[in-house]
Amino acid sequence: MIKFSNMVKNAGYEIVFNTLSLSTFEIMTGIVYEGFDYSRLVQYVDGLFLMTYEWGNYIGIPTGIISFDNIRQYVQDMTERFPKEKIFLGIPILGYMWVLPFVLGESRGIAISSNSAVELSGDVNAVIHYDDISKTAYFGFITDREYIVRFRDARSIYEYLNLVDEFELNGISIWNIMQFYPQLWLVVNALYDINVL
């Protein structure tokens, strides 16, 4: 990253960002790989995106079953390593759908946008529930097989935005901004004054 950052800045680009994420091993065990020199990284970037949305995905640990307290602890740890004014919290607007029963190491989830998850719940007449531990919305349904869908809704987004305020971060980043998610922007608009430059 450091060589790349210097190359980008020397090429005339003004702003350089990097993304940081813990592995699911680090999340579940609390053992953090220390081989990367974080103190040097901060000298070469203008901003850091904390990826909180790849802590589970279509393989490995399913998205939405990791306690939100782990995400909060991760943000706290990063604010102790980096200047808060350089940190942006990554907010996911993608979810995943799995066939049940879930078998660790074998099951594969299907990525689904949060909009599609909400639409699907209506199509299959499913009730959307909320998991207070992981701060994720979820529902199940049965067609040819049994499925479970986990995604972030307005309640989830509100919890992420509370972390931004609590730790005085610079702002948020969205994965994936190409998917317009009305619940996200309704919560953002309700909590913040947006200035257009």
Image: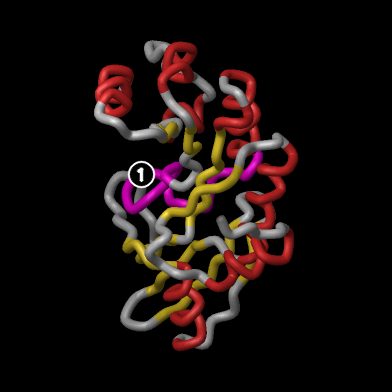
> Main SS type for the magenta part?
loop
> Which image quarter: residue 87?
top right
Is residue 62 magenta-colored? yes
Residue 100 visible = no
Q: Residues within 10 Å of mark 1 (few under 14, many from 20)?
A: some
Q: Which residues are magenta?
A: 54-69
Location of residue 189 in the rendering, given as x and y in whole percent from the top left corner: 67, 65
Location of residue 98 in the rendering, given as x and y in whole percent from the top left corner: 37, 63
For the N terminus, give its image quadrant: top left
The residue under the point 35% across, 44% down is 60
Is residue 146 magenta-colored? no
Residues 175 and 35: in front is 175
> Which image quarter: residue 135?
bottom right
* Residue 173 versus residue 153 in the image, above or below: above
Q: Which residue is mark 1?
A: 60
Location of residue 130 in the rendering, given as x and y in whole percent from the top left corner: 64, 64
Residue 133 visible = yes
For the C terminus, give its image quadrant: bottom right
* Amino acid on which disc 1 is placed: Gly
Location of residue 42 in the rendering, given as x and y in whole percent from the top left corner: 48, 20
* Residue 55 versus residue 179 in the image, above or below: above
The residue under the point 68% across, 43% down is 163
Q: Circle 1 — which element?
A: loop
The residue under the point 46% across, 51% down is 63
The residue under the point 55% across, 42% down is 89
